[in-house]
Structures are given as structure tokens and as C-alpha cells.
């Protein structure tokens, strides 16, 4: 291949993760290819829709039409407040019931085995099951059971799965971090408590991920709550604009790869 293989690591962030759509849109408009994607939590949701073949216009329409009612199926709490059956049906519908290995580019979906404290990476199997596991925010969603494993949100163990993209064979890794720790944050619900706690726990891990990626994109979405599904348009735009500013840096990385290839 006369160009580097480019992999994208789409990070966790709940509603702020819609910025990933803006990132992908900006890359496409700049003719920067996306050869593979790894996603955690909301990143896996966007990756699965992209991999299923939805173009940028379709992704945009799907996202701006998304509402919390699509995944709110409350149950009597035992291991979570939300059963997750509605969101799984939504994912299955819009990924056409496909398996991960059937997608148009290689996709990896990250989840956390809460019993074994291990990272689980899905590269095959039903998309809906894997994404449902990857978005299972602990204490909010009931964990997903797959092959005897009890799985929760991929962001718990690997918020921006840069290492997974490298293992997939990417020459250049672009990470997208939509996490945000607010000081003096407004904490009103159990969702706020859990999300803020996860964000704080991940601070050091995210710093290490930045060093491991070639380019780390951080859309300015900190002003939006991770549970805000009423500002999706603005969140997508933030991802697009931030990526547009980083295009020269990405192109420079691609050129550097070519120069190193010729030197060998």
C-alpha cells in the first residue's frame, strides 16, 4: 500500500460521543481514508453505524433524530435501572442485523468483563450484542451477558482504545477523546454521579493514551452534559470543526510515514 493504514479510536462519552460523527465527516471531506475503527461505549455505537454502511448524511439524520426514549426501558433495579433491550433493538435495526465481520471496514468494539476485570474486544459476532455490552454504563444499564461473561461499558477499562487500533494494524492512529471532567459540576442524578466518577478515574489513563496516538482530537464538548440529547447538532459541529483544524497535522503524519517508508 502506497499510503499508511489509518485507524480511528473513538472514545466513550455518552451524548458527547455524537462528536465522533463530526470527526468522521471532516476526515471524509478532507479525503483522509478511515481503514479501521475501534470504539468504546458511544464510540462503538458510532463505529457500528459507520461500518454498517451509513453515509455521513444518514449518520447525521439518525443522530439528530435520536432521543432518550429509544433506550429508556426502566426495570426494578438489581444490577441496573435500564434493561437495554430497546437500544439493542435500535442498533440491530440500523446495522441490518449484521455481524461485526460483515461490516465494510474492520471494526473492534471494546467492553469490560466486570467479574474478571479484563478488557474484552469484539471483532466478530452480532453487532447489537457487542455494542449493547460496550455502552452498559455501570449502575445505569444492566450488564450484558455474552459467552458466560458479564460485560459493562468499554470506557471503564479503555476510554479511548488507541492500543486496540494499533493491534488491528494501523500505521497512523487518530484518537478522539470526548470525555470532560467539570470542576464544580452540577450533580443532580445518579447518572451524573456515575459519569463524573468514571471521568475522574480515567484522567490519568487518557493522558497516557494521548502519548500513544499520532494525533489526539479533543472536540470542545465539555459544556454539554453526557446525558444531554438536546444539543446533538452542536456536538456534531464541535467534532467537525475541531477535526478540520487538525487536518494539517494528520496530513503531516501521513507524509512522515511515506518518507520513513522510502528510507527503508
Image: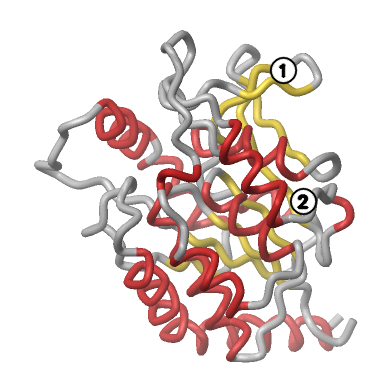
Count of numbered circles on the image: 2
Residue at the far top: name it: 78
Q: Which quadrant holds the C terminus?
A: bottom right
Q: Using the image, tell me which numbered label, if any, was put on residue 241.
A: none
Across and down, in percent, residue 89 comes to: 66, 41
Residue 56, percent from left and from top: 60, 78
Q: At x 19% / y 47%, what residue is drawn? A: 182
Q: Is residue 221 left or right of residue 260?
A: left
**Label 1 residue SS:** strand
Question: Which of the two discs, 2 and 1, labels the residue nearer the N terminus?
Answer: 1
Q: Is residue 17 above or below residue 191?
A: below
Residue 47 at x, y percent in the picture? 65, 58
Instruction: Return the residue nearer the eye: 250 or 109.
Output: 109
Q: How is the image coloured?
A: secondary structure
Q: Which residue is painted at 69% across and 48% down in the image? A: 164
Disc sitting over residue 167 in the figure: 2
Graded by Cα atoms within 10 Å as few (under 14), some (14 to 19) or many (20 or more), the crowding at tag 1 reads: some
* Residue designated by label 1: 149
List x then y, in percent, for residue 82.
Answer: 46, 26
- Mark pair 2, 1: CA separation: 23 Å
Which one is in front in this view, the residue at disc 2 or the one at disc 1? Answer: 1
Q: Which quadrant of the rendered structure holds the N terminus?
A: bottom right
Nearest the camera: 58 or 40? 58
Task: Tell me: 213 left or right of 227.
Answer: right
Question: Above or below — where is 190 with respect to 232?
Answer: above
Q: Secondary structure at mark 2?
A: helix
Question: Which quarter of the figure has residue 152?
Answer: top right
Q: Is residue 70 left or right of residue 182?
A: right
Residue farthest to the left, as pictured: 184
Q: Residues within 10 Å of mark 2 (few under 14, many from 20)?
A: few
Amino acid at each position: 500500500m502506497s499510503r499508511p493504514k489509518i485507524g480511528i479510536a473513538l472514545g466513550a462519552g455518552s451524548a458527547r460521543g455524537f462528536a465522533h460523527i463530526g470527526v468522521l465527516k471532516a476526515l471524509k471531506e478532507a479525503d483522509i481514508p478511515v481503514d479501521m475503527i475501534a470504539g468504546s461505549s458511544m464510540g462503538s455505537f458510532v463505529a457500528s453505524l459507520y461500518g454498517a454502511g451509513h453515509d455521513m448524511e444518514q449518520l447525521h439524520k439518525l443522530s439528530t433524530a435520536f432521543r432518550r426514549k429509544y433506550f429508556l426501558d426502566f426495570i426494578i433495579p438489581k444490577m441496573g435501572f435500564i434493561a437495554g433491550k430497546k437500544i439493542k433493538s435500535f442498533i440491530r435495526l440500523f446495522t441490518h442485523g449484521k455481524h461485526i465481520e460483515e461490516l465494510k471496514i474492520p471494526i473492534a468494539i471494546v467492553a469490560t468483563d466486570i467479574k474478571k476485570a479484563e478488557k474484552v474486544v469484539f471483532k466478530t459476532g452480532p453487532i447489537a450484542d457487542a455494542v449493547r455490552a460496550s455502552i452498559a454504563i455501570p449502575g445505569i444499564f444492566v450488564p450484558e451477558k455474552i459467552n458466560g461473561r458479564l460485560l459493562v461499558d468499554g470506557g471503564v477499562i479503555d476510554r479511548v482504545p488507541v492500543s486496540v487500533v494499533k493491534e488491528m494494524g494501523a500505521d497512523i492512529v487518530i484518537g478522539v477523546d470526548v470525555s470532560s471532567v467539570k470542576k464544580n459540576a452540577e450533580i443532580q442524578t445518579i447518572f451524573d454521579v456515575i459519569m463524573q466518577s468514571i471521568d475522574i478515574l480515567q484522567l490519568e489513563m487518557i493522558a497516557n493514551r494521548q502519548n500513544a496516538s499520532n494525533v489526539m482530537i479533543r472536540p470542545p464538548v465539555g459544556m454539554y452534559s453526557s446525558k444531554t440529547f438536546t444539543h446533538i447538532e452542536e456536538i456534531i459541529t464541535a467534532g467537525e470543526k475541531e477535526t478540520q483544524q487538525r487536518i494539517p497535522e494528520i496530513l503531516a503524519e501521513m507524509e512522515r510515514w511515506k518518507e520513513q517508508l522510502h528510507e527503508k
